[in-house]
Image (cartoon, rainbow, N blue to C red):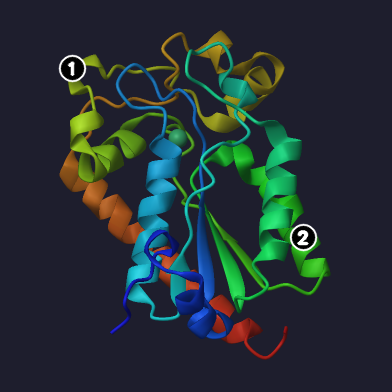
Amino acid sequence: MRRSYRLDSLTWPEVAAVAASSLLAVPVGSTEQHGPHLPLTVDTDIAAALAETLARERDDVLLAPAVSYGSSGEHAGFAGTLSVGQEAVESVLVELGRSADAFAGVVLVSGHGGNAAPLARAVARLRREGRRVLPWSPTGSPTDTHAGRTETSVMLALRPETVRTHLAEPGDVRPLPELLPHLRASGVRAVSANGVLGDPVGATAEEGRRILAAWSSDLLTATARWADATKTAAH
Ligand SMILES: [Zn+2]
């Protein structure tokens, strides 16, 4: 039985003893508005919960503290959104990956779609450098991409005390491909006054637990496949 799988509870000699045979799971989130009914840390909370499940389920995974700020320029104009931009996200992930060389590999568990492009660039770079990195992010409906039914249900399962259910109301419910040009040109504020893309009405904790179970199983499968496939390929 491991003493702990969390870096926030382990010392360096304890990590040194297992690092070479361990993967490091890093939650990658954001601090950005999630409508009038959810807290600003939704993406980080979700990434951290999924990374924690991975570390709990696999003896060879340790959990790192989350990267809590992301690229959230599209949510500018909503108080509390704190964005560091794409360039910063990319270089944080590259440097973080490089400094994790004591580990057998790194799993980046992403909770924020806005980080996708810099995340992909960072992963490509780290792989070119010969490092083992797996990026993973949850999938969802294109009409429910931000603070809608999915994220609200998951937060009701994870941190129900933070959800203002009585303030949950629909935002813009058009599918993401249709919204993207508007979002890129003028941000969420221009299409959705309350900051929601989707409809959170009717979200339940039970649905949230089902979604979390499906995401966890997908993350576990992806990690298992990748870990097996790259075991002998890289250093
Ligand atoms: Zn989110």
- Residue to which mark 1 is pinned: 166
Above/below status of 56 relative to 230: above
Q: Nearer the viewer, residue 20 or 50?
A: 20
Q: Amino acid at mark 1?
A: His
Q: Position of residue 160 (x, y in %)?
A: 19, 36
**Where ligand 1 lies, by quadrant?**
top left
Q: Which mark is residue 124?
A: 2
Q: Residue at x 55, y 25 (%)?
A: 82
Local packing at callout 2 (Cα closer than 10 Å; few below 14, some 14-19, many 20+) is: some
**Quadrant in the picture for residue 1:** bottom left
Answer above or below: position of 11 versus 125.
below
Which residue is at a point 38% across and 70% down the rendered structure image?
Answer: 5
Q: CA distance from mark 2 to mark 1?
A: 43 Å
Query: Residue 52, position in %: x, y?
Result: 37, 61
Please tell me whether mark 1 sits on a helix, a strand or a loop.
helix
In the rendered view, would you say 205 is above or below 235?
above
- The residue sitting at the right extreme is 128
Q: Quadrant of residue 173?
A: top left
**Splitting the image into 4 quarters, where does residue 230 fall?**
bottom right
Residue 100 position in % (x across, y down) = 64, 67
Image position, residue 170 (x, y; %):
34, 18
Report the front residue among 177 and 139. Answer: 139
> Which residue shows up at 22% across the image and 22% down it?
164
Pick the quarter of the image with the C terminus. bottom right
Q: Who comes first in sequence, dot 2 or dot 1?
A: 2
Which type of secondary structure does the marked residue at label 2 adopt?
Answer: helix
Residue at 58 percent across and 77 percent down: it is 226
Left or right: where does residue 12 sit relative to residue 87? left
Total tally of numbered discs in the picture: 2
* Above or below, 51 relative to 154: below
| Mark 2: amino acid | Ala
